[in-house]
């Protein structure tokens, strides 16, 4: 074989290698981009579904609806109860404490949507968190802290390519009034303190918030509220999946 023939063969091999490499890079990049776009769309749809869940739960809490049903499409995600979190309200010598199990949606990519204490929070895989839907707390001379005590009669997590109907129903209601004498504390024990701190510190009546690490990835967030009394209205909500 002549030197020219060898050069032609080498040239063809280099060109083919370059083409195959380019196709591989484009394919890998394209597939990753499509997957990211698909996952983002699925999480966005789930955000809307949890906003509806919040609204439906409010219908049960405030408007006397016996129950409400919310449809959530999973698309390889998981839906189930999360680790317990608590809320404590204390005034001048009185206190009330409630521990609840949040509703948690976990996407295929690892992002989470959490419905807890009447709020919807998004948690990224890297741990960053933002409050998407706020709770119905009201702070003034007479403050209101509605507590949503979500519990699961069947604490099974569901997942896969399916759709789930989340049924919420009220089991019991109770109201407590705490005399604060000018200052009350609202304490949340949660693995997601950052969005709650931002929510509280945006309130004019909230004087200060402190955080204490209590282990197991949880933080005790205590916020002091300038108020004369706090009304804690607690609704026990039974959550079932169908």
Image (cartoon, grey):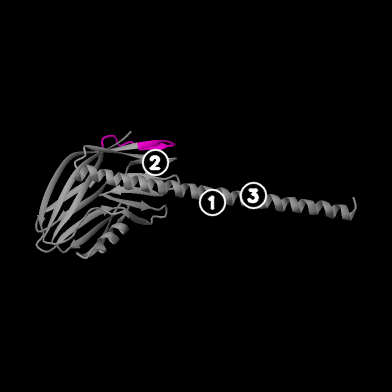
10 Å neighbourhood of mark 1: few (<14), some, or many (≥20)?
A: few
Q: Do the residues labelled 2 and 3 touch (CB within 8 Å)?
A: no
Residue at mark 3: 24
Q: Distance between the residues labelled 2 and 3?
A: 32 Å
Which image quadrant for residue 186?
A: bottom left
The x, y position of residue 25, in whole percent, is 62, 52
Asked whether residue 30 is drawn in magenta, I would say: no
Res 76 label: none
Q: Nearer the viewer, residue 2 or 23?
A: 23
Residue at 9%, 62% (x, y): give it: 181
The x, y position of residue 90, in whole percent, is 14, 56
Instruction: Say above or below: 73 vs 40.
Output: above
Which image quadrant for residue 164?
A: top left
Instruction: Say above or below: 152 vs 198.
Output: above
Residue at mark 2: 78
Q: Distance between the residues labelled 3 and 1?
A: 14 Å
């Amino acid at each position: 074989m002549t030197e020219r023939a060898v050069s032609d063969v080498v040239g063809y091999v280099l060109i083919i290698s370059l083409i195959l490499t380019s196709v591989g890079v484009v394919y890998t990049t394209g597939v990753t981009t499509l997957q990211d776009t698909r996952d983002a769309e699925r999480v966005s749809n789930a955000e809307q579904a949890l906003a509806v869940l919040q609204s439906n739960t409010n219908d049960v809490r405030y408007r006397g609806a016996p129950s409400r049903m919310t449809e959530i499409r999973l698309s390889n995600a998981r839906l189930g109860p999360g680790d317990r979190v608590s809320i404590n309200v204390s005034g001048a010598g009185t206190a009330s404490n409630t521990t609840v199990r949040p509703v948690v949606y976990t996407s295929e990519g690892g992002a989470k949507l959490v419905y807890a204490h009447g709020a919807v929070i998004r948690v990224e895989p890297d741990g960053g968190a933002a409050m998407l839907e706020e709770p119905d707390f009201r702070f003034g001379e007479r403050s209101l802290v509605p507590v949503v005590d979500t519990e699961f009669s069947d604490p099974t997590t569901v997942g896969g390519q399916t759709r789930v109907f989340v049924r919420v129903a009220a089991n019991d209601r109770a109201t407590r009034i705490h005399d604060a004498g000018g200052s009350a504390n609202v304490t949340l024990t949660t693995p997601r303190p950052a969005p709650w701190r931002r929510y509280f510190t945006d309130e004019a009546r909230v004087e200060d918030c402190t955080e204490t690490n209590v282990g197991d990835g949880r933080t005790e967030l205590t916020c002091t509220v300038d108020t004369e009394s706090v009304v804690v209205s607690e609704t026990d909500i039974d959550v079932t999946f169908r």
